[in-house]
Image (cartoon, rainbow, N blue to C red):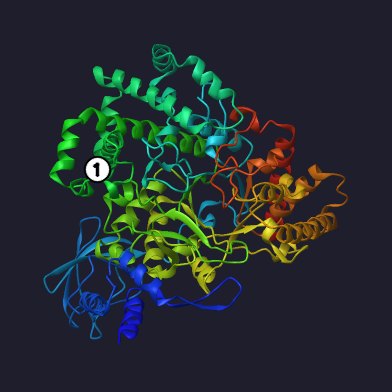
């Protein structure tokens, strides 16, 4: 009885007991693992009694009377509501614009599909709910270009890797603005950037952009105070703090020294805030407006930062799950008391968010006003740190006791634990998808596009209980239809394209489902092989995915040609001798195959620089609506930003370019490759129109 009930409970909450691995072999989750994952989902399953109670609770929540606060529908399509209401029931509807509409359910209990796109308030049988009516698809490149088909191109950059005079040791929003102007002047349509989600201000040892404290707020280290407050005000503060030499030393480093650079930047921001808060600053009105518009989400994050600093000062650590129970609740009187006791500290964090948001806004304005069709493409991490601000403020909607990862496969035989938490499907439904919608809006606020990391997470995620190995997890299914409708609605609202990072094991049918919603997939040159060394012909690349020469997790083309990534894996003992030999053998075949393919299209290639030139032309000639080339490939760099599977040994998220952002695209190699890319895109357009 217990096993049957356990499996039924798992199925009811969306846990997949059976799944197919990367080698196309059937796998089954063990019952002990199911129990632990269910516990993490909030469904006790330790014994027969607990399973029975959890199953009854889940079934009760699904009965006829349980009406979710938000339902989604497709524009022009009827919505079945017979599960909740009687057929022919009258419907009162207040449209998003405030106007009213009287309608009713038909004899089958369906709401006619005559409502416009938007979020509308409906009342049926004295019960109210929100109906989100979504457009058929996301905003697309087809919508943004004057002469289809779209054959756009752009650059990809790790924001911290940029330089500018006076940057303090890493790239910031002002350096991004400078690069955006230069790229736009050269005809780029887009500039894709690394995630700029908020990290912990108090715990600067953790600086991976893909493990944020919150995906609702920004990393305030990227603030460019000179852009808003002026150079003189910043220079005076630096001199008063005696930071001149430290900042100069940091700027000269080849790698970002995150702890030191963060400490210097925070000290500077605190000094600037002191000056800002003492008098009636001319920008005070703009700041107050920003803070009011930020609402509860901004206030909770700022309070969390203050609580976290207090907790660390008292030896309680950065993880809110280890704090006193009263501090677990964002609405608890003790949390309110701390905020009231330190109003300036709370306001300081809002001040930092304001500086960063305005800097990002300037960068997007610079991109668009100088001719980019898209501008910035933001990057959305797949999850957030379970110990961070978003998990604390949205506890019913995030699964802080489960970690996202990947099951074992050929490259990672132990599986992967990414150390972040994901949304709760049940929590999202209970709260009208609030956390998902606010996250989309926050990340689309100053961007013309959004890249969704591990877009497979809209369908399912591999979740691992805290304290367990990566292999001891299970796939949790997500309400993909609802999420895609909301994504399409917010995309159209913001006139922003959506990119889905669909690399790895993709569930059957998901790519087709994403393509139908105009979500562009990703095709990466080193992966576009039918067998080692057999690269796909140009016209076999799809027209529903962006094309690129690489990603932040791969060696740039120069490094790939030299096997620098394999060298690193050997140096850090990530692979055994047999695996290394196999990888090097395959890489040799791949190098020869790529050179052969490129030579067939572009003639003799005397050296690796010529191979990189040809590779950029090659992706440029594909039918992809958008081609993105990492700056590392434009410049011919051979080291990658991140080496997956490492947290030490390799300088992840720390590499910087040698030249300032203003000068990067004037580099001899970059200038030549930009011209080749622009020509290839024009030729692809001429061919396909």
Quarter of the figure with the N terminus: bottom left
Which of the pair 378/204 is nearer the observer?
Answer: 204
- The picture quadrant where one finds residue 579 is bottom right
Tell me residue 567's x, y (percent).
Answer: 71, 48
Tell me residue 612's x, y (percent).
Answer: 76, 46
Q: Is residue 177 left or right of residue 477?
A: right
Which of the pair 487/575 is nearer the observer?
Answer: 575
Which residue shows up at 78% across the image and 62% down it? Answer: 533
Q: Secondary structure at mark 1?
A: helix
Tell me if residue 543 can be seen.
yes
Q: Which residue is mark 1?
A: 295
Q: Is residue 246 left or right of residue 477?
A: right
Q: Is residue 38 left or right of residue 613?
A: left
Tell me residue 408's x, y (percent).
Answer: 55, 66
Quarter of the figure with the C terminus: bottom right
Up/down of 203 relative to 646, above or below: above
Q: Residues within 10 Å of mark 1 (few under 14, many from 20)?
A: few
Which of the pair 301/246 is nearer the observer?
Answer: 246
């Amino acid at each position: 009885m217990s096993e049957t009930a356990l499996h039924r409970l798992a199925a009811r909450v969306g846990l997949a007991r059976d799944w197919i691995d990367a080698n196309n072999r059937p796998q089954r989750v063990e019952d002990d693992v199911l129990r632990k994952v269910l516990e993490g989902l909030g469904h006790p399953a330790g014994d027969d009694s607990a399973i029975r109670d959890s199953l009854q609770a889940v079934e009760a929540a699904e009965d006829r009377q349980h009406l979710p606060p938000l339902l989604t529908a497709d524009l022009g399509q009827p919505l079945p509501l017979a599960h909740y209401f009687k057929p022919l029931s009258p419907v009162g509807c207040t449209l998003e614009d405030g106007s009213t509409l009287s309608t009713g359910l038909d004899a089958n209990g369906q709401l006619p599909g005559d409502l416009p796109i938007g979020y509308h308030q409906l009342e049926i049988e004295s019960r109210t709910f929100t109906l989100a009516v979504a457009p058929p698809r996301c905003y697309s490149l087809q919508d943004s270009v004057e002469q289809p088909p779209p054959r756009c191109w752009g650059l990809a950059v790790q924001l911290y890797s940029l330089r500018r005079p006076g940057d303090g040791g890493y790239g910031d929003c002002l350096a991004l603005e400078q690069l955006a102007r230069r790229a736009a002047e050269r005809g780029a349509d887009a500039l894709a950037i690394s995630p700029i989600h908020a990290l912990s201000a108090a715990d600067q040892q953790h600086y991976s952009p893909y493990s944020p404290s919150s995906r609702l707020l920004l990393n305030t280290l990227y603030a460019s105070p000179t852009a808003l407050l002026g150079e003189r005000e910043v220079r005076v503060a630096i001199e008063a703090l005696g930071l001149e030499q430290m900042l100069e030393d940091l700027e000269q480093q080849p790698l970002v020294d995150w702890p030191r650079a963060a400490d210097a930047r925070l000290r500077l921001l605190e000094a600037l805030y002191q000056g800002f808060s003492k008098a009636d600053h001319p920008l005070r009105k703009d700041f107050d407006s920003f803070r009011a518009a930020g609402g509860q989400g901004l206030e909770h994050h700022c309070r969390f930062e203050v609580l976290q600093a207090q907790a660390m000062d008292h030896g309680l650590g950065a993880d809110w799950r280890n704090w006193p129970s009263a501090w677990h609740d964002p609405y608890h009187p003790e949390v309110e008391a701390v905020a009231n006791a330190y109003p300036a500290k709370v306001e300081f964090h809002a001040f930092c968010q304001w500086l960063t948001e305005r800097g990002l806004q300037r960068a997007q304005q610079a991109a668009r006003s100088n001719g980019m069709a898209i501008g910035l493409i933001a990057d959305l991490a797949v999850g957030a740190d379970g110990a961070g601000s978003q998990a604390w403020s949205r506890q019913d909607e995030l699964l802080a006791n489960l970690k996202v990862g990947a099951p074992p496969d050929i490259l990672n035989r132990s599986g992967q634990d990414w150390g972040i938490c994901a949304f709760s499907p049940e929590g999202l439904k209970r709260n009208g998808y609030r956390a998902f919608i606010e996250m989309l809006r926050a990340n689309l606020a100053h961007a013309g596009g959004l890249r969704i990391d591990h877009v497979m997470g809209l369908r399912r995620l591999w979740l691992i209980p805290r304290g367990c190995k990566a292999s001891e997890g299970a796939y949790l299914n997500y309400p993909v239809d609802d999420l895609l409708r909301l994504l399409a609605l917010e995309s159209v609202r913001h006139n922003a394209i959506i990119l889905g990072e669909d690399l790895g094991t993709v569930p059957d049918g998901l790519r087709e489902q994403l393509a139908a919603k105009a979500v562009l997939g990703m095709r990466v040159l080193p992966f576009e092989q039918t067998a080692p060394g057999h690269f796909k012909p140009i016209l076999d690349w799809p027209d529903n995915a962006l094309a690129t020469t690489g990603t932040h997790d791969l060696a740039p083309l120069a490094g790939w040609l030299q096997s620098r990534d394999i060298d690193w894996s050997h140096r850090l003992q990530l692979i055994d001798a047999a695996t290394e030999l196999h990888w090097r053998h395959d890489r040799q075949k791949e190098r020869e195959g790529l050179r052969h393919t490129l030579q067939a299209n572009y003639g003799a290639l005397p050296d690796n620089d010529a191979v990189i030139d040809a590779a950029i032309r090659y992706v440029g000639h594909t039918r992809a609506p958008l081609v993105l080339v990492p700056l590392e490939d434009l410049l011919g760099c051979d080291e990658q930003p991140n080496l997956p599977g490492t947290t030490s040994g390799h300088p992840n998220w720390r590499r910087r370019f040698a030249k300032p952002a203003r000068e990067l695209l004037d580099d001899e190699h970059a200038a030549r490759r930009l011209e080749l890319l622009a020509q290839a895109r024009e030729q692809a357009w001429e061919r396909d129109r």
